[in-house]
Amino acid sequence: MRHAGEFAVGVLIGFLGGMFGTGGSAIATPLLSMLGVPGFLAVASPLPAIIPGMTIASGGYRKSHLFDWEIILWSAGVGIPSIILGSYLTKYTGARPLLVATGVLVLGFGISFLFLPREGRFTTLKLNEGCASPRPPFWRLRLFLVAAGVGLIAGLLAIGGGFFFAPSYSRFLGLPIKKSFANSLPVSIALAIPGTIIHAHLGHISWTIAALLALGSLPFSYLGVWVTIHTQAARLERIYGAALTILGVFFLMRL
């Protein structure tokens, strides 16, 4: 029965990952923990499983011209060394603090998007708006800090980083919500690969769990992208905030 539950978790993270521009490992970790998967296995096993689904979802966003390659390349270049450092630091942190940190961060971002949305009520992003977004002051410094911080957190929590890149792009770089989701995916793929290698070396990954998650997520990743592209941006931001808030509260109550 636990394997059926792990497959169902894969279906959920595939859909939500495609919809919200994340690999879904931050969602999978608390759900696997509730299914009885031991600490580090619940934290790290989703990491390799999210790569195929993120690749499929990225293709959907790329066709809609939502990528900003300057942001993607800078984020990957800074984030990869940071996730490597964070992954090795897990040897000194223990599993429970990482699970608590996941819940707190998810809840914090959820409240932010739910009660302090940035998108105007009638804001929409047309599919042909592929030009670069206006840059805020000191945007490269902001991007460097976001990539370094999220990379470190992603390494510690054994996630691809999309769950924190997407809201950080929106909040700190001023990207529209759909472009934030889109740009987080290829960066998450780049960061998930070294994270997977390191956590596998540390013995934190169950490949059976990873395979079940991947099988469940693959068919639903592109469906999530389709829903996001065809949803009004202001409504999407509220949905995003509500989903994160509910998940964060539920997870923290179960720890």
Image: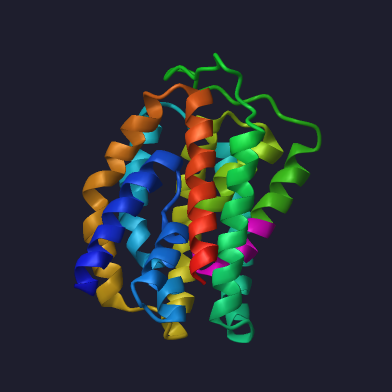
Q: Residue at x 41, y 73 (%)?
A: 42
Q: Does the magenta stretch include residue 152?
A: yes
Q: Position of residue 194 (x, y in %)?
A: 48, 68
Q: Which residue is drawn at 47% across and 85% down?
A: 202
Left or right, residue 9 beside residue 127: left
**Relative to 106, residue 209 above or below:** below
Q: Is residue 9 magenta?
A: no
State which quadrant residue 49 falls in.
bottom left
For this rendering, which residue is in front, 176 or 241? 241
Q: Which residue is drawn at 74% across and 42% down?
A: 140
* Residue placed furthest toward the right: 137
Say whether residue 6 is visible. Answer: yes
**Relative to 79, residue 92 above or below:** below
Q: Quadrant of the N terminus?
A: bottom left
Say whether residue 160 is visible. Answer: no
Q: Where is residue 209 in the image (x, y as percent from the top left)?
A: 28, 72
* Residue placed furthest toward the top: 122
For this rendering, which residue is in front, 211 or 16? 16
Give the colour scheme shown. Answer: rainbow
Labels in figure, total: 0
For this rendering, which residue is in front, 20 or 51? 20
Q: Where is residue 65 in the image (x, y as percent from the top left)?
A: 43, 27
Q: Where is residue 234 in the image (x, y as percent from the top left)?
A: 53, 24
Secondary structure mostly seen in magenta is: helix
User: Which segment did they paint magenta?
Assistant: 149-161
**Relative to 164, residue 122 above or below:** above
Left or right, residue 8 beside residue 200: left
Q: Residue at x 61, y 47 (%)?
A: 109
State which quadrant residue 105 falls in.
bottom right
